[in-house]
Image (tube, rainbow, N blue to C red):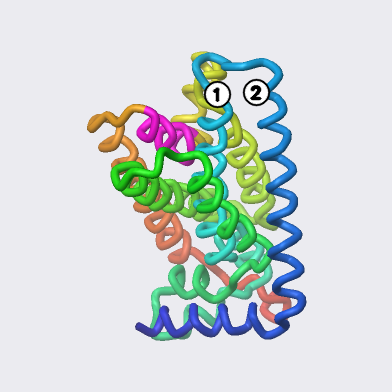
Amino acid sequence: MRVARVFRLAVADALANRRSFYVQVIAMAINDLTWVIFWLLFFNAVGNVRGWNGDDVLVLFSILLTSAGIALGLLGNSRKLGQLVADGEIDAALALPLDPLAFLLARRVDTALLGDLAMGPLLFAYASDHTPESLAIYLGGVACASVVLVGFLVTISSLTLFFGGRGEQADLGFQAILIMASYPLDIFGGQVKLVLFTLIPAAFVTGLPTSLLRDFDPATALALLAAAIGFASLGVGLFRLGLRRYASGAVWTQA
């Protein structure tokens, strides 16, 4: 409940300047719309690409935008944990009667990325077959994709606790996974596809959820759920392990 209160305060802070809030959300939605138009024009010109058509890619984008809106918009610190560690800004969280990681993730909302969260369901409503089964798969896929995305970003951000630095690896990982997740999984070859299932788990963010919507398979669904549990456990475990060796990065504690 205390973490929920922290999140409500973060939302209230994001809404404090309503004009700025709506401008940022609308600007991001327009940016997303340009990509949608690009892909529609592309598939209108070339037809299917390895079995993928325009509607399939719109569904892929709906999953990507919704999960990114949750993982990076509602949990705005998910890709900034390394920077928070380097600046000593996690010190206050360690003194609170709350789980430090949950507090840090919940305390900031990235307003601009809420435009993704708004656009994602609209794209799904446009491109899906509008059945209850598809909606259930979409919601489950988005939930798993969001967990994988947050878990991955927390994992690579936690490396700052062990090796120092400014958390630059989180920005690199963030850019890499979003770029890779923006394309149909079937266009990648064997070695690259292996990377997308391991080091940069973009396959679990859009590839498998979209595959389930195209042709549901229980084994694929279980693999996606296992990936979500695995990356969440890895992120939480590595962050907590790193805290055991953490020394404040605040300027006033440095010699």
**Which percent across, then down, holds residue 200?**
53, 36
CB contact under 8 Å: marks 1 and 2: yes
Mark count: 2
Q: Nearer the viewer, residue 74 or 60?
A: 60
Direction from residue 255 to residue 123 in the image, left or right: left
Position of residue 219 measured from the top left corner of the image (x, y, whole percent)? 24, 30
Q: For residue 27, which quarter of the picture?
A: bottom right
Q: Amino acid at mark 1?
A: Asn
- Asked if one can make out residue 198 in the rendered structure from this viewpoint, the answer is no
Residue 151 in sight: yes
Residue 28: quarter of image: bottom right
The residue carrying mark 2 is 43
- First in sequence, mark 1 or 2: give its number: 2
Rendered view: 245 above or below 196: below
Residues drawn in magenta: 203-214
Residue 29: image tag? none
Q: Is residue 168 toward the left or the right of residue 152 in the image? A: right
Label 1: how many residues lie within 10 Å, few (<14), some (14-19) or many (20+)?
A: some
Name the residue: 39% across, 29% down.
214
Residue holding disc 1:
53
Residue under the point 26% across and 37% down: 222
